[in-house]
Amino acid sequence: MAEAKTPIAVIGCALDLGSGRRGVDMGPSAIRYGGLHDALTALGHPLDDRGNVIAPTLERLSQGDPSARYWDAIRDICGQLADEVAAAVGRGQFPLVLGGDHSISIGTLGGLARAHGATGGVIWVDAHADINTPASSPSGNVHGMPLAVALGLVDDERFATDAWPQPAVAPHRTVLIGVRSVDAGERELIRRAGITVYTMSDIDRLGMHRVMETAVQIASGGAFLHVSFDMDVLDPEQAPGVGTPVPGGITFREAHLAMELAHTHGHIAALELVEVNPILDEHNVTGNLAVDLARSALGARIL
């Protein structure tokens, strides 16, 4: 008898308030349009598409303090997302969260910590460290802050909440992969917190297989293990539809290997695919690639 596959809850978060460029709120639709439903049901997973958590229209909002633009609205949306993620875990489902800008990770990790307990581990696959605080951020864009928030590194009463445990993840179980754009303030926070980082130079030198297997070992052992995959970690020639492209990223094959290893060795509790911007994409290449990566993370193999 074939082994029963884990039921999946697809949760979109149509949020672009944390980003400096518009359009990433359409990312969940672009990924679904890329054939997500058929791709995952073909693997045998029962699929429950929960629709999208919808952000308010930016033009109707005040940005508030420019050190953390639109934070009040982002906090509310992340609270709704945390509710959806925690509810999915309670139903025995695997949350597959579609972004939206990377600030949605505050809600995803918050929901996982509420459901599983704090503190968990996270593998953060991204060109950027996303560990700025309002005090260190050059832009005030919250999509550059979610990891700092989840780690409890933001010493700012505006970020205090009862919506989820704080911190949601532990620094010693946090691994960044593919990083190649880090702000000065982020460097200091990374060193102080003792977070493991594999830059693109490390991947070139060590290879993705070794990097990912080590990352899984480091990030495992906590209340949960989450993988957050920002599509801008890929080289822009392969994933053009992202808001903050950085040349010199990982390849299509390295990305798939990372997701295959996460599935094989990680016992991951949730997966997040963020920063798909269809306005900047070419024939939904980036949305389609996100679907392929979800398949790899959920058990697809060549043979």
Image: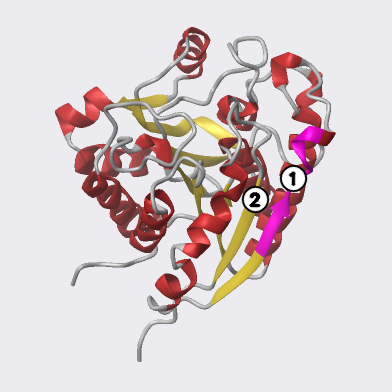
User: Residue at 75% across / 35% down in the picture?
Assistant: 58
Q: Which of 49 and 27 is in front in this view?
A: 27
Instruction: Report helix, strand or loop for mark 2.
Output: strand
Left or right of residue 134: residue 28: left
What colour scheme was applied to this rendering of the protein?
secondary structure
Q: Which residue lies furthest to the bottom in this view?
A: 1
Instruction: Report helix, strand or loop for mark 1.
Output: loop
User: Residue at 35% across / 42% down in the picture?
Assistant: 239
Q: Which residues lie in the magenta part?
A: 51-59
Which quarter of the rendering shows the C terminus? Answer: bottom left
Task: Of the two numbered discs 1 and 2 on the same chain, state the one appearing first in sequence.
Answer: 2
State the CA–CA distance, disc 1 to disc 2: 8 Å
Left or right of residue 51: residue 206: left
Q: Where is residue 120 in the image (x, y as percent from the top left)?
A: 55, 42
Residue 55 image label: 1
Q: Amino acid under label 2?
A: Cys
**Are dots 1 and 2 in contact, CB under 8 Å?**
yes
Q: Position of residue 277 (x, y in %)?
A: 51, 43
**Residue 125 in view (yes/no):** no
Q: Which residue is the site of mark 2?
A: 13
Left or right of residue 12: residue 218: left
**Residue 289 in view (yes/no):** yes
| Residue 192 versus residue 232 in the image, above or below | above
Decide whether residue 160 is among the magenta residues: no
Q: Amino acid under label 1?
A: Ala
Q: Mark 2 Cα within 10 Å, few/some/many (few <14, many 20+)?
A: many
Q: Position of residue 37 (x, y in %)?
A: 49, 72
Which quarter of the rendering shows the N terminus? Answer: bottom left
| Residue 250 versus residue 25 in the image, above or below | above
Q: Which of 86 and 277 is in front in this view?
A: 277
Quadrant housing residue 132:
top right
Q: Which of 301 and 58 is in front in this view?
A: 58
